[in-house]
Amino acid sequence: MFVGVTVLVGVCTAVCPAAEVYDYSPREVMNTVQTEDDDLLEDLLKSDKIWYCGQCFSCKTRCPRGNSAASVILALRRLSVKKGYFAESEKGRQQLIAKRIFGQNMLDRGYTLLAKNITPEHFPELGENWEYYYEHMAEMREWWGVPMDLENSPGSHRQIPEADMQELRAIYEKTGAIALMDAVEQGMEKKLGSKAEVEKYWQTWLETADSRDYEMPNS
Ligand code: SF4
């Protein structure tokens, strides 16, 4: 990927919301990429840094050189997953959660996120109203006239026709998205040592809503 001239101005970092909350700088990422130093690049691909970006693209719209740190970071993430380096960092390992929720939902239902995934335990900040909705989801949707899982019904959670789902899965196959999802499972298994450990990591997140509660083998 071409990165136009250097990015010494640092506007990307100045406008970056992720830089406000993490030890993170898109300018630093871009500078590392431009070194073309294999060791530095490998360290970057194994680090948490490439996973801090929220893909808001503010850096792209403000860069006076027309560079897009957001796009470079996307390419780095893809490479990190392909090479299995993502499993070396705590934020990188969270790709398993993303894959099993967003990725699997897309393949099964045609949505990235379903209300059933937004549990009150995992999102306590949504408060009591959400807790009530979560517990009474099916009946409330009937009451609103947007029932769940019905083909051709309005709104989210409608059932996508099977022919469309097959088309969607074929796109995921052709574009390499499914191969990337498989690479996430394989990379995690390699890093954690077994499929059973990968399941333990997943269960830990399901139970505590914090993947940092998982204890790495040999840590
Ligand atoms: S796309 Fe990423 S790097 Fe760019 S401003 Fe948003 S969070 Fe920062």
Image (tube, helix red, strand yellow):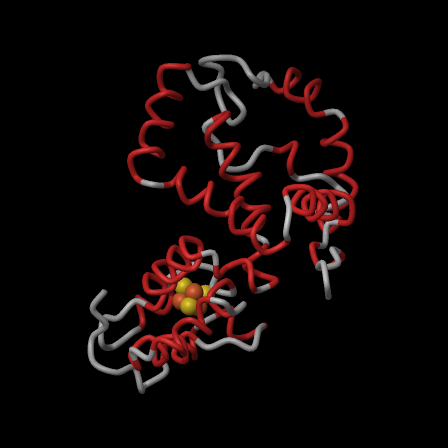
In this rendering, is residue 185 above or below 212?
above
In this rendering, is residue 219 above or below 81?
below
**Quadrant of the displayed image that contains ligand 1:** bottom left
In front of the other: 127 or 163 = 163
Image quarter for residue 89? Answer: bottom right
Where's residue 80, x and y in %?
43, 59
- Circle count: 0
Where's residue 20, x and y in %?
55, 75
In front of the other: 80 or 143 = 80
Q: Quadrant of the N terminus?
A: bottom left
Where's residue 65, x and y in %?
22, 76
Q: Is residue 5 left or right of residue 44?
A: left
Residue for point 30% across, 39% down: 175
In the displayed orientation, state which residue is furthest to the bottom. Answer: 8
Residue for point 77% across, 37% down: 131
Q: Quadrant of the C terminus?
A: bottom right
Residue for point 38% across, 79% down: 27
Image quarter for residue 30? Answer: bottom left
Q: Is residue 120 left or right of residue 68?
A: right
Where's residue 31, x and y in %?
34, 81
Image quarter for residue 117? Answer: top right
